[in-house]
Image: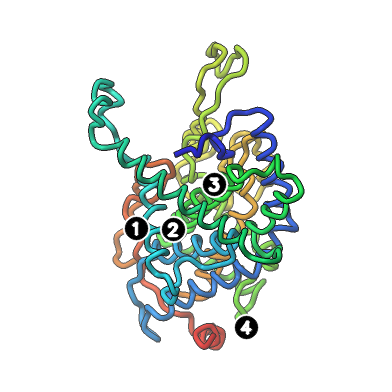
């Protein structure tokens, strides 16, 4: 499942990992490259708003489920950035391809949520108890076939477009074939598709759940959007730097519910001391991001939701706030994630009125898994804001 350790996430630290880091940081996630895809993020955010409008009544609150809409938006953003095509459009010529791909992504994400008894009873491996090996082999074949087909499709095309990451990678492959092998490119594509989708959607869902439980904070965020963006156009990426409180909401959401509660496993290269414990060379180390973010010795009232605590600079918090990891292993896609989350959450706040489906608070139970989604998908009451009717009618017409 780790693609022969060609993922940057799973590759051991060394020359190959440093090459992957350089490729993703300079060639794929630089500020210039991210700005190239701003229209993609804008388009898919509008599509999400459109699907919400089509699922609600004109002037009455309607119950909507946010998770599938957010997941589709994030999947489409990543697919268009990587390949230039939407993968979850109901008007796709090959709808079955989209359905199979979506099912594959869900199966791979779910794989980490299952407890296997053979981990405690090794002899069960002999009979493949619970069918884990069969499942993994089947999923491996699916994802290998998908990346091969995608790569082959673009190799047959004439001309290079800087609008797609896959074209940019193939262009680099032509000039530096040793550093950019097919295996390396497949690993980068799968990392983007598997990691760059579910996490952003989950963060927006957590943020909306928390805001519904604290409606006065939702009103404060909406007032900021109305002041700095207005009501004559949809929020744009160029507006995000003005929305300080919106960014505080995102930061506080990632503090309480980091998408990676346990950071990627590390291995001590030398004997060292951590927290008063002697750690021998070659020991696997797990950083508990969730616990660090809720440490009462670091955070005042750590379990409460208070975006105002981030009115200070995030960089001043050091290792006490690490939603995207830290050091050399820090997530290189943090910039992209912040833009997707900011656009998605800001648009939901700007365009719709929201309230809970009952007086009962929204449940904040966490599900198990490699990431940390809500256990119960968020459902809320929503209706279009009257002051945004002119703008939203244009969205529907488009």
Camera-nearest residue between 390 and 210: 390
Q: Are marks 1 and 4 in contact (CB under 8 Å)?
A: no
Q: Secondary structure at mark 1?
A: loop
Residue 267 left/right relative to 159 = left
Residue at image location 33% in from the left, 72% down from the top:
63
Name the N-terminal-most of marks 2 and 1. 2
**Position of the C terminus by quadrant:** bottom right
Label at residue 232 = 4
Q: Considering only order in the chain, which callout, 3 or 4, is on the residue closer to the N terminus? A: 3
Label 3: which secondary element: helix
Eye-nearest disc, 1 or 4: 1
Give the alpha-carbon distance from disc 4 to disc 3, as whole Å: 38 Å
Residue picked out by circle 3: 191
Q: Marks 1 and 4, how far apart in space? A: 32 Å
User: Measured along the vertical axis of the image, is residue 142 above or below residue 282?
Assistant: below
Whole-number angstrom distance, CA of label 1 to CA of label 3: 25 Å
Task: Single out the mark in the foreground, 1 or 3.
Answer: 3
Q: Position of residue 390 (x, y in %)?
A: 55, 88
Q: Earlier in the sequence, mark 3 or mark 2?
A: 3
Closer to us: 377 or 134: 134
Q: Secondary structure at mark 2?
A: helix
Q: Disc 2 or 4, which lies upstream in sequence?
A: 2
Residues at marks 3 and 2 touching, judged by CB atoms closer than 8 Å:
no
Up the image or down, 368 lies above or below 34; here it is: above
- Report which quarter residue 131 is drawn in: top left
Q: Are marks 2 and 1 in contact (CB under 8 Å)?
A: yes
How far from the left and from the top, in percent, is residue 326? 62, 36
Q: Which residue is mark 1?
A: 377
User: If the image is split into quadrants, where does the N terminus sit?
Assistant: top left
Which quadrant holds residue 239?
Answer: bottom right
Q: Residue at x 41, y 64 (%)?
A: 97
User: Gap in Å between the C-alphas at discs 3 and 2?
Assistant: 22 Å
């Amino acid at each position: 499942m780790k693609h022969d350790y060609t993922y940057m996430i799973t590759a051991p630290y060394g020359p190959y990992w440093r090459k992957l880091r350089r490729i993703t940081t300079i060639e794929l996630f630089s500020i210039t490259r991210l700005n190239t895809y701003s229209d993609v993020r804008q388009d898919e955010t509008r599509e999400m708003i459109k699907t919400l409008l089509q699922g609600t009544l004109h002037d009455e609150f309607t119950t909507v489920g946010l998770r599938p809409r957010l997941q589709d938006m994030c999947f489409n953003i990543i697919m268009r950035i990587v390949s230039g095509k939407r993968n979850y459009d109901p008007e796709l010529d090959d709808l079955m391809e989209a359905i199979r791909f979506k099912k594959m992504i869900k199966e791979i994400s779910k794989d980490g949520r299952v407890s296997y008894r053979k981990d405690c009873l090794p002899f069960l491996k002999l009979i493949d108890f619970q069918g884990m090996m069969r499942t993994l082999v089947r999923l491996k074949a699916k994802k290998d076939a998908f990346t091969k087909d995608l790569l082959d499709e673009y190799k047959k095309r004439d001309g290079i477009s800087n609008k797609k990451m896959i074209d940019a990678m193939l262009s680099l492959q032509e000039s530096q074939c040793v550093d950019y092998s097919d295996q390396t490119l497949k690993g980068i594509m799968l990392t983007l598709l598997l990691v760059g989708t579910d996490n952003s959607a989950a963060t927006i869902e957590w943020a909306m759940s928390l805001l519904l439980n604290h409606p006065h904070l939702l009103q404060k965020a909406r007032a900021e959007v109305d002041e700095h963006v207005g009501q004559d156009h949809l929020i744009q990426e160029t507006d995000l730097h003005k929305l300080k409180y919106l960014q505080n909401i995102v930061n506080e959401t990632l503090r309480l519910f980091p998408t990676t509660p346990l950071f990627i496993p590390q291995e001590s290269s030398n004997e060292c001391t951590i927290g008063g414990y002697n750690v021998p060379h070659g020991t696997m180390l797990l950083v508990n991001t969730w616990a660090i973010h809720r440490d009462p010795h670091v955070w005042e009232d750590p379990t409460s939701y208070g975006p105002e605590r981030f009115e200070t600079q995030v960089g001043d918090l050091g290792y006490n706030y690490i939603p995207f990891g830290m050091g050399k292993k820090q997530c290189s896609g943090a910039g992209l994630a912040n833009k997707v989350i900011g656009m998605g959450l800001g648009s939901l706040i700007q365009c719709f009125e929201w309230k809970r489906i009952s007086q009962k608070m929204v449940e904040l139970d966490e599900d198990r898994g490699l990431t940390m989604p809500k256990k119960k998908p968020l459902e809320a009451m929503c209706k279009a804001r009257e002051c945004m009717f002119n703008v939203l009618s244009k969205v529907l017409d488009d």
